[in-house]
Amino acid sequence: MLSGVPAESELSNRRLDTPDWRPEAAPNGVAANSSRAADSDPSQTEPSAVPPAESRPNDAAPAVSEPNGFEPVNLADFAFDSTAPADDSDGAQRSTAKEGVRSVDSTISIPGMAERNDSEERSAITPGSHFGKYELLEEIGRGGMGVVYKARQKDLDRIVALKMILSNHLASGEQVARFYAEARAAARMNSPHVVRIHEVGSYDGQHFFTMEYVAGPSLATIVKNGPSPFDVAARYVKAVALGVEHLHGQGVVHRDLKPSNVLLDENDEPSVTDFGLAKTLQGGSENTTVGAIVGTPSYMAPEQASASRSTEVGPRSDVYSLGAILYELITGRPPFHEQNPLDTLVQVLEGEPPRPGRLRANLPRGLELICLKCLEKNPDDRYASAGELAADLERFLKKEQLEVKNVGVWHRFRRWSRREPALVSRMGTMALVLAIIQINHSLVGSAEAPGYGRLLAVVAAWAVASIGYQALLRDERRADLGRYAWAWTDVFLFTVIVYIYNGLSTSLVAGYFLIVSASGLWFRERLVYFTTVASVLAYAVLVLAEAWTMGSSMPSPYRHVIFTSVLAVSGLIIAYQVKRVRALSLYYERRPLP
């Protein structure tokens, strides 16, 4: 027996919620991952790193007491802060910089996040140094608050992942509480698909915890190589869903499930890690603060992205994130991945991702239905639990009848309207114009109705052009060009309709305000300016045409000056509001994210 390591019978009588309990692991020479084999092989003598969840109450407070400078820590002394920004340093125990993750995929928390200086001092502890009984081998992850090292536990001669707070002397009480909240959430888990925690404590005032080291890549690394085979993607997400179901059974919602937070071991089995944003469900109520937006934009559920709906965040929010992971595995891209966090959040709230089958040929219809059911905007329309999702994925792998069914026509229409809102809004406008033209034609009569046939032809051309521009927007490389061309076409064809339909004497000229206002929905300041200038110039052309026709009998131009001035000012106001929103987005894009 190793010196200082209690016998298995002695260890089995110790509990994580008692002051003298100290996690131990494999005997000398046994890899950290062998603890998983012991789950299925009773002949293994390695004691469990964390007592089974059923052997201790869920609200038990883990405590650790260590000699040689290690201080006892009682996690019950720290509040679980569910609204604080996450520390993504151990997301997949890999540095997001090494993985090439763009800033839009970084974990964010808004509003009310504490300011952080870009030049904040980093920890003086470096790879190659010793940290108590641990030898730090290399840094494998770093976030805004924490850093993760691959380390060797010298007394047991095993490899672990060691996480500690960056710049410990600068850490606030809130950050320390969040750090231990993450450790507490992880310590409650006992699932082969959740990365296990070994030890929690502090050494020389430096807070840390250790967890099993998973040597394989993360799903974020896997997806960089392109979409996964359908059965492999289904198997990965099924296993992760089982782990997440275990989390929910322990009263924990992860809230930051994404490919970089799922690790693959040497047996190609996935495990969930990074509980920096996890929150507990206590007494049936959700321990959260209204108004906090936390998570990773591309993978967060709509209720997470909306401050007014933060109380709705629960287990089905994790089901949405599982669907987002499945979507990326089978298509090679997240459901929503815009140029900045703001655009991504807007899409999460209001948009609909492209159908997976459109992005990848030969995608089985059943797998697409499973994915889309997870990504429903309304939590009630998703799978009721991660376990139900895992069961349907198991049926897919076995080629059995799935529980998920095709949705109705109205549901498909709603999805389409969210997926292509620009086209839907223009089609609605054209329908309204056609209705006005038809009513006028019926009341006035064909003999007096101005250019009835020409009006129908222009509206039809507008519809065809809109469908073409919508297709152009699906190509990210030409999307900006498509938006400007679409805006110009809207102004031009609308001007033609006004000219045919009694010119400036018709109330249809108010439509210019609608066109300028609609351009702000793209959240692009220059596009608003472009549309405003185009609308003012188009109206000026109508004024000149009227002056050419009427000659000296044309009434005073003052009303036209007033109209164009109000139109221009409206465009400036809309552009200014877009600029303010964009400034907020750039702030969160450029600042060091937690």
Image (cartoon, rainbow, N blue to C red):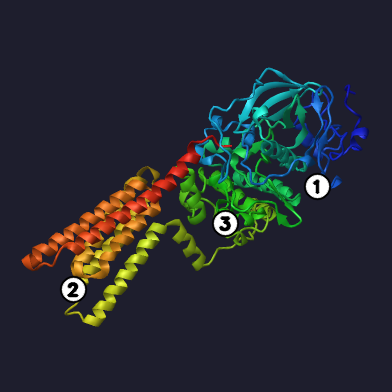
Dot 1: what SS?
A: loop
Instruction: Where is residue 5? Give x, y as percent.
Output: 88, 26
Asked whether the residues under the numbered discs 3 and 1 touch, taking CB atoms below 8 Å apart as contact, a structural biologist would say no
Q: Nearer the viewer, mark 1 or mark 2?
A: 1
Which quarter shows the C terminus? Answer: top right
Quarter the N terminus occupies? top right
Where does residue 84 sit, x and y in percent of width and height? 63, 43
Image vertical order of residue 215 relative to residue 530, above or below: above
Report crowding for label 2: few under 14, some 14 to 19, many 20 or more residues within 10 A (C-alpha). Answer: some
Q: Which mark sits nearer the N-terminus, 1 or 2?
A: 1
> Label 3: how many residues lie within 10 Å, few (<14), some (14-19) or many (20+)?
few
Report how far apart the C-alphas of labels 1 and 2 lie in the structure. 77 Å
Res 500 seen here: no
Q: Residue 308 bears which disc, if any?
A: 3
Camera-nearest label, 3 or 1: 3
Q: Which amino acid type is marked by label 1?
A: Asp
Is the residue marked by circle 1 packed among few (<14), some (14-19), or many (20+) residues within 10 Å? Answer: few
Nearer to us in this view, 91 or 383: 91
Check disc 2 and give the amino acid type: Pro
Is residue 41 in view? yes
Residue 374 screen position, x and y as percent: 59, 55
Q: Label 3 sits on what residue type?
A: Ser
Depth order, front residue of 149/289: 289
Residue 236's label in the rendered image is: none
Residue 450: which disc? 2
Of mark 3 and mark 1, the one earlier in the sequence is 1
User: Residue 592 placed where, x, y %?
Assistant: 54, 34
Q: Which residue is mark 1?
A: 59
